[in-house]
Amino acid sequence: MREFILNPRLVTATLPVGDLPLCRVLLLNEQRYPWYLLVPRRPGIEEIVDLQAADRSVLMEEITWVSRAVKAEFNPFRLNIADIGNKAPQLHIHVVARNPNDEAWPAVVWSRPLVSFNADDKSRKWQQQMRNALTVTGQFIARSEHVDPGVERL
Amino acid sequence: MREFILNPRLVTATLPVGDLPLCRVLLLNEQRYPWYLLVPRRPGIEEIVDLQAADRSVLMEEITWVSRAVKAEFNPFRLNIADIGNKAPQLHIHVVARNPNDEAWPAVVWSRPLVSFNADDKSRKWQQQMRNALTVTGQFIARSEHVDPGVERL
């Protein structure tokens, strides 16, 4: 049985948050919107329809937990949730906090240049806010870190 | 208890397909991509997190049926699936067939000008293909038609 390995594009584009029972939760390296990803830790899955039915049901609940966490922590006007994967062929679900005064509104945030976090601590705050909010659900398993082949990064 | 009424923006932008147990299925009036919408027939629902847990689970399965139907009928390279709703405040899930030779690839199709169907019969074909593919699942309830206040349109 193959092992789950986070797609290198997703490693590069994100900061780690932690694991729910099914999904790895990541924070996109984008300072303008709280923007999280859920990646089911199943090898070889590219689309929602590739998942087993039981995993799809868990995925929906984990999307809901992350959505509620984003709402509780950031109080957005709207959540934008999507499975796109045109560039990174590993199933990942975007959950993005959107507001009428954000830079892209009312357009979508995808397919636009990203603006990375600065050296400030906003990214650490957003990582920790999600960890705290998911811990409250009782479903948060563990913090995760990004692992490169042979190199563990903090 | 309030009745489900399809949001007027969604009525205007789409052609009817039919009903699954939870969702109304629609075809977006856009000729370049097979692009379907699922709208849970529950009044007052704007986001996935507003649904009851049982409905969320059904929604995930209906997304899967429509996804499989799109794959079977159009054999796309990738499905793009999203809940956005920045303009129409009624929960609707996009399921779009995407290919590397389509006009937007690899960008997303949202927030771009739409190109409506011509007078040709492609829209009727795409409506009927989805009806046929959903009928095979045994879960297709009925064709639906758009209803304006006081006016029923074919």
Image: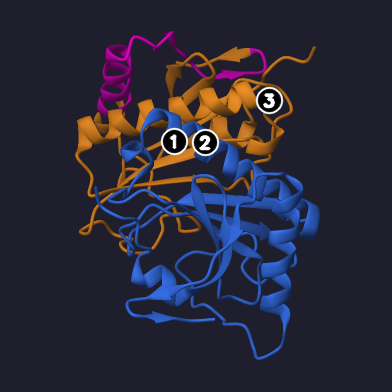
Chain colours: A orange, B blue
Q: Which residues are magenta?
A: A125-150
* Mark 1: secondary structure: helix
Q: Mark number for residue A52?
A: 3
Chain bearing tag 1 is B
Q: Is residue A144 magenta?
A: yes
| Residue B41 in view here | yes
Secondary structure state at the residue bearing disc 3: loop
Against B94, residue B35 (above or below) is below
Of the residues shown, which amino acid type is indicated by label 3?
Answer: Gln
In the rendered view, does A102 fall on the left or right side of A9?
left
Q: Residues within 10 Å of mark 3 (few under 14, many from 20)?
A: few
Q: Tag 2, which chain?
A: B
Residue at 48 percent across and 81 percent down: it is: B153
Q: Is residue B75 visible?
A: no
Q: CA distance from mark 3 to mark 2?
A: 15 Å
Residue at mark 2: B58
| Residue B10, quarter of picture | bottom left
- Where's the C terminus of chain A, which quadrant? top left
Q: Which residue is mark 1?
A: B55
Give yes or no for contact between labels 2 and 1 (Cβ–Cβ under 8 Å): yes
> CA–CA distance between discs 2 and 1?
5 Å
Q: Is residue B52 left or right of residue A22?
A: left
